[in-house]
DNA sequence: CTGAAAGCGCTTACAG
DNA sequence: CTGAAAGCGCTTACAG
């Protein structure tokens, strides 16, 4: 006789002298099993080190035990840190993380049309993707609770976790104003034409409004791609103008880091000749001594995961998480900003 | 009539006028279906945007359609880039990626004892984790093809993709020697006591051997933790000694970036007073103008995924991938190294 | 409280 | 090449 590969519910039932129906009930902690029977079943299961087959369980109407995470890319600090936050939250819950990346327009289209996650997950987290109306409709066909995290807030009352980007920009610009700058330029990033996953217009709005509040109008603005090279290029554009501003607000730390590179190569010292500030608190900001406005990224991932798991009842936490959670940002002053000379 | 939530194989069978047996065969690409029938079935499936239920498939002895990826952490450049490479390869294959992180010793222990991935994946990729004998044994109980990628090479003939760390170190040290340095120190990183996921001793060996080949013996070495702060600390240790070496080989770019930070704060200019070189080509290396030895990280992920999928027959590529693949590293000269004065 | 039974959606011998 | 049928391991009404 060939020994069976795995022990199943029937084995447990036989060993404890009951039907598999009772075993199932006992194991799921449901009602309808006498304490004595339950005890007998549980110990039999323990002795056989029995584990319920997730496939069979799912096929019979149980949960998949999986959370889908949809993210534009993985190999970028923001996304991988959000992911880490989500993973933190899943770690001990026995919920598996199924990852979907949408690196380009084709992949994105494929994802929303084919919905490869359908029937495969109990819930989903969508990271930093502004969705079209059609995409929202398609996503609803997944038929599972979904929360959005980071990036562009999704207008309506959909569950969302993120930061107030306008406020973050105001904090950055406010810092420059406070230490005495008024001649402040911005290197702003334009959305990728293919996939507009970058932060929306809020940071740009915050820049202009904070300046306007201080009576400064018509600041210099250059527009580049959201990348380190974009930032480099942006600073080159600024350098090619008649006169250098005393400070530059960068759309993001990546932009700012590129700007710093250009300044270093041009031999212009920071902050002596010009102050530079970013937004995000990217790990490289610390290395490069960049003043910035920090956003709690990992916490955003954690909160999103928690919210979506709560809405599933997978967790015993009370359902108190509001559908929209805005996390605070915080000014981090480092060496790249100083009063103008 | 309430519309069904999901379309199943029966729907596809009905639409294409065949039995579900044929649908199953056609979809799995197996033999025993006429080309015409297969075509009809595939287009019906496409029209209904049908997706095979992984649970049912699995329960009937089919594959899960999932690849498990085990990674120490996500929120670090190396790991997230490997992941991106794996995702690249999976993108169009319809294979889902299930992610497991082992952030600490407890999680690691839990993972190898409970094997939460058992029966949930068709194959696995283990990223940058040197395994104990027991862990290897446990992992085998997963019963699926497994490939290891990055970090410590797993001695035996297990499938592995990575770089030659000793050679990378030799390339870095060789560069310093070539431009005239002989007084070269190393800031080396020690493994984490909890989880020794760091690169093994190969880079340290490469450092010493390359120097020895040039007749240099007994170089200064300081040991710190593998992190930016560790690198900072390492350079402080070097600065506190009687005499500064003319060049420093850093165990990794993270170490080097920390070292640069310390030097900048101490007002010691690079490369005028001291040359610094790292290994990895971390994105921040470019920003900080750090000379380094680049390793192709994304490609490692891609190759690992391809290798494991090949061994599964999920893919039509020929099984030519050798069990051990070593990728080339490449010296990238930037501004942090120059001949000694 | 307990069990017999249907059914979840597939895969794969086994017969045509 | 094609289909009827058994069976994968569970859950959940439905009856006792």
Image (cartoon, coloured by chain):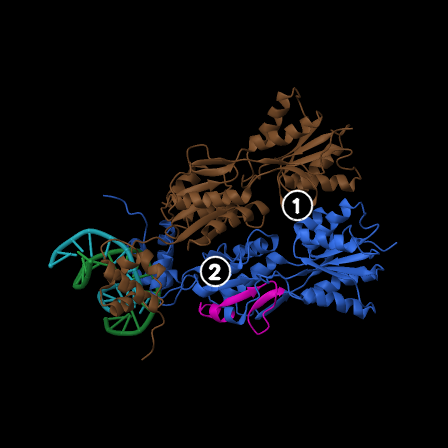
Chain colours: A brown, B blue, C green, D cyan
Q: Nearer the viewer, residue B314 or A164?
A: A164
Residue A233: % across, % down: 70, 38
- Image quadrant in which you'd find residue B36: bottom left
Residue A200: where, in percent of width, then height?
55, 34
Res. A115 visible in picture: yes
| Distance (Cα) linking label 1 and label 2 | 30 Å
Q: Which x, y percent locates residue A152?
A: 51, 36
User: Label 2: chain?
Assistant: B
Q: Secondary structure at mark 2?
A: strand
Q: Residue B68 has which mark? A: 2
Marks 1 and 2 on same chain: no
Q: Nearer the viewer, mark 1 or mark 2?
A: 1
Question: Does the segment drawn in magenta span residue A108?
Answer: no
Q: Which mark is residue A284?
A: 1
Q: Is residue B144 magenta?
A: yes
Report the quarter where the C terminus of chain A lies.
top right
Query: SS at mark 1?
Result: helix
Residues rendered magenta in the picture: B136-162
* Residue name at image x 69 percent, y 32 percent: A248
- Residue B167, above or below A108: below
Q: Is residue B147 left or right of residue A118?
A: right
Q: Is residue A239 above or below residue A111?
A: above
**Side of B328 relative to B4 (left or right):** right
Residue B313 lies left or right of residue B291; in this view the side is left
**Mark 1 burial class by Cα count in 10 Å: few <14, some 14-19, many 20+:** many
- Is B37 or B73 nearer to us in this picture? B73
Looking at the picture, how far across and down is residue B304, in whole percent?
Answer: 55, 63
């Amino acid at each position: 006789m060939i020994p069976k590969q795995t022990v199943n519910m029937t084995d447990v039932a036989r060993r404890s002298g009951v039907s598999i129906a009772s075993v199932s009930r006992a194991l799921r902690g449901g009602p309808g099993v006498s304490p004595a029977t339950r005890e007998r079943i549980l110990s039999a299961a323990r002795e056989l080190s029995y584990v319920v087959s997730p496939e069979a369980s799912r096929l019979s109407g149980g949960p998949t035990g999986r959370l889908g995470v949809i993210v534009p890319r993985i190999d970028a600090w923001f996304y991988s840190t959000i992911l880490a936050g989500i993973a933190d939250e899943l770690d001990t819950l026995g919920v598996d993380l199924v990852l979907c990346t949408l690196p380009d327009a084709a992949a994105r289209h494929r994802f929303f049309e084919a919905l490869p996650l359908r029937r495969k997950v109990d819930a989903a987290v969508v990271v930093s993707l502004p969705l079209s109306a059609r995409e929202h409709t398609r996503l609803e066909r997944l038929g599972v609770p979904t929360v959005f995290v980071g990036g562009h807030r999704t207008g309506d009352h959909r569950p969302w976790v993120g930061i107030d980007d306008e406020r973050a920009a105001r904090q950055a610009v406010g810092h420059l104003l406070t230490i005495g700058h008024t001649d402040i330029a911005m290197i702003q990033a334009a959305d990728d034409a293919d996939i507009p996953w970058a932060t929306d217009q809020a940071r740009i709005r915050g820049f202009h409004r904070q300046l306007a509040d201080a009576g400064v109008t018509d600041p210099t603005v250059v527009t580049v791609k959201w990348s380190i090279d974009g930032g480099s290029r942006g600073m080159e554009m600024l350098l090619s103008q008649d006169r250098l501003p005393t400070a530059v607000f960068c759309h993001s730390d990546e932009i700012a880091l590129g700007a710093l590179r250009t300044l270093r190569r041009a031999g212009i010292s920071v902050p002596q000749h010009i102050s530079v500030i970013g937004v995000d608190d990217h790990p490289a900001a610390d290395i490069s001594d960049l003043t910035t406005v920090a956003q709690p990224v990992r916490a955003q991932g954690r909160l999103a995961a928690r919210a979506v798991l709560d809405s599933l009842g997978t967790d015993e936490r009370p359902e108190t998480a509001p559908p929209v959670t805005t996390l605070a940002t915080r000014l981090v002053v480092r060496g790249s900003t100083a009063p103008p000379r």
